């Protein structure tokens, strides 16, 4: 096999520890070469703890490191565009956390910078890379639930009120953080873009949406009902309803190593739910592997333009929620 892709990570946050580090450790063909934090000494501590060869006290130094081939951007939403563009200009491939940016305009600039530099840009919608996502598409294509009519997706948890996700200037808001998954999933499942959007939110004192209902209509009169919330118990599920059955995806966007698809092949009340097995997989490892595959192929197998298309829908959704405020 050719030389492993050497990754650098910009920041020491929760998803780095919980997702990316275990994911890259389980990915042959990828290695974690360097880690940076804006907080002095933090990257050194993490590097020692996780056996990472290099530690930097600034993102600029990591980006300038000639031994780094690809950069993972797990920063707060407001920092995605800045660091993606800087890394691309230094010739590094970029795996950027979701959502790509705060605005469509920012996402367009990121894609342009990566195209100009000839580097790969991938949005870190890890759930798409898990084998369950592909298996779900196959079941739909085989007609396992007949014609798709309804998509339901819910993602919520009780957010500590001190989190940056409540700050609008940091790219906060339940839609950007959680609703983006349901929108991404409905576009992935329909392989299409919505023809109409409607949204209603409950707003937090800082100006971000705390809870949002999103209704999307897709070609073929497929409807998607998506909800997201920072003020509710943890829920993360999706259901695809057809005219001949339904598919349930427990822990939709955060499947564990072992996950299942629940399939009801009938519209009869009380019809059994069959467990469709899915190969065990760590979705963060799948994500790194897919990204490395794109680098090796020299083209984006998971196009960043898809992230841009998601951003376009999210911007429309947020605008509609603002329009419906106080109605
Ligand atoms: N795909 C997934 O499963 C998940 C994705 N995410 C995404 O990952 C990103 C980070 O989320 P999470 O790890 O939960 O967040 P944390 O609050 O735990 O970490 C924030 C991160 O942002 C960095 N950062 C850079 N600039 C700033 C700044 N100006 N202010 C504050 N922090 C800054 C910090 O690095 P430093 O060490 O330099 O301070 C740190 O790495 C978000 O984009 C989020 O949407 C989050 C959770 C799950
Ligand atoms: O992307 C994400 C997935 O899960 C988290 C909740 O558990 C979110 O807050 C996060 O930003």
Image: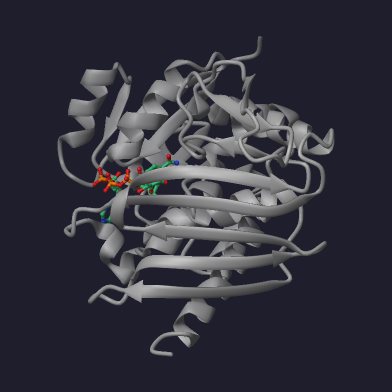
| Residue 112 image position (x, y, % from top left) | 64, 60
Residue 292 visible (yes or no): no
**Number of marks:** 0
For residue 62, which quarter of the picture? top left
Q: Which residue is drawn at the image coordinates 31% and 25% (left, top)?
A: 54
Q: Going by the picture, which residue comes out furthest to the front?
A: 269
Q: Would you say 195 lies left or right of 100 here?
A: right
Residue 301 visible (yes or no): yes
Depth order, front residue of 208/12: 208
Relative height, residue 315 to residue 114 (above, below): below
Depth order, front residue of 59/110: 110
Depth order, front residue of 160/296: 160
Q: Which residue is drawn at the image coordinates 26% and 41% (left, top)?
A: 37
Q: Which residue is drawn at the image coordinates 26% and 58% (left, top)?
A: 164
For residue 48, which quarter of the picture? top left
Relative height, residue 53 to residue 244 (above, below): above
Q: Which residue is drawn at the image coordinates 30% and 59% (left, top)?
A: 165
| Residue 166 image position (x, y, % from top left) | 27, 64
């Amino acid at each position: 096999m050719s030389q492993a892709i050497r990754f650098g990570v910009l920041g020491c946050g929760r998803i780095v520890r919980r997702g990316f580090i275990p994911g890259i450790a389980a990915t042959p063909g990828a290695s974690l070469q360097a880690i940076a934090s804006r907080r002095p000494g933090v990257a050194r501590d993490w590097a020692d703890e996780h056996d990472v060869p290099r530690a930097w006290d600034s993102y600029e130094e990591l980006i300038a490191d000639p031994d780094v081939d690809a950069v993972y951007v797990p920063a707060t939403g407001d920092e995605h565009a800045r660091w993606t563009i800087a890394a691309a200009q230094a010739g590094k491939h970029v795996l950027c956390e979701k959502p790509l940016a705060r605005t469509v305009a920012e996402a367009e600039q990121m894609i342009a910078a990566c195209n100009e530099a000839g580097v790969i840009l991938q949005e870190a919608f890890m759930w798409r890379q898990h084998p369950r996502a592909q298996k779900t598409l196959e079941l739909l294509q085989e007609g396992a639930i007949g014609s798709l009519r309804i998509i339901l997706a819910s993602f919520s948890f009780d957010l500590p009120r001190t989190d940056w996700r409540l700050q609008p200037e940091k790219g906060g808001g339940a839609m950007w953080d959680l609703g983006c998954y349901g929108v991404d999933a409905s576009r992935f499942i329909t392989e299409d873009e919505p023809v109409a959007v409607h949204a209603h939110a409950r707003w937090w004192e800082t100006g971000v949406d705390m809870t949002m209902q999103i209704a999307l209509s897709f070609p073929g009169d497929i409807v998607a009902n998506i909800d997201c919330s920072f003020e509710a118990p943890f829920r993360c599920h999706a259901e695809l309803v057809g005219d001949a059955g339904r598919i349930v995806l427990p822990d939709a966007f955060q499947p564990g190593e072992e996950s299942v698809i629940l399939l009801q092949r009938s519209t009869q009340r009380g019809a059994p739910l069959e467990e469709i097995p899915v190969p065990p997989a760590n979705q963060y490892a799948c994500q790194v592997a897919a990204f490395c595959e794109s680098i090796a192929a020299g083209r984006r197998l998971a196009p960043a333009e898809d992230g841009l298309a998601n951003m376009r829908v999210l911007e429309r959704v947020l605008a509609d929620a603002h329009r419906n405020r106080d109605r």
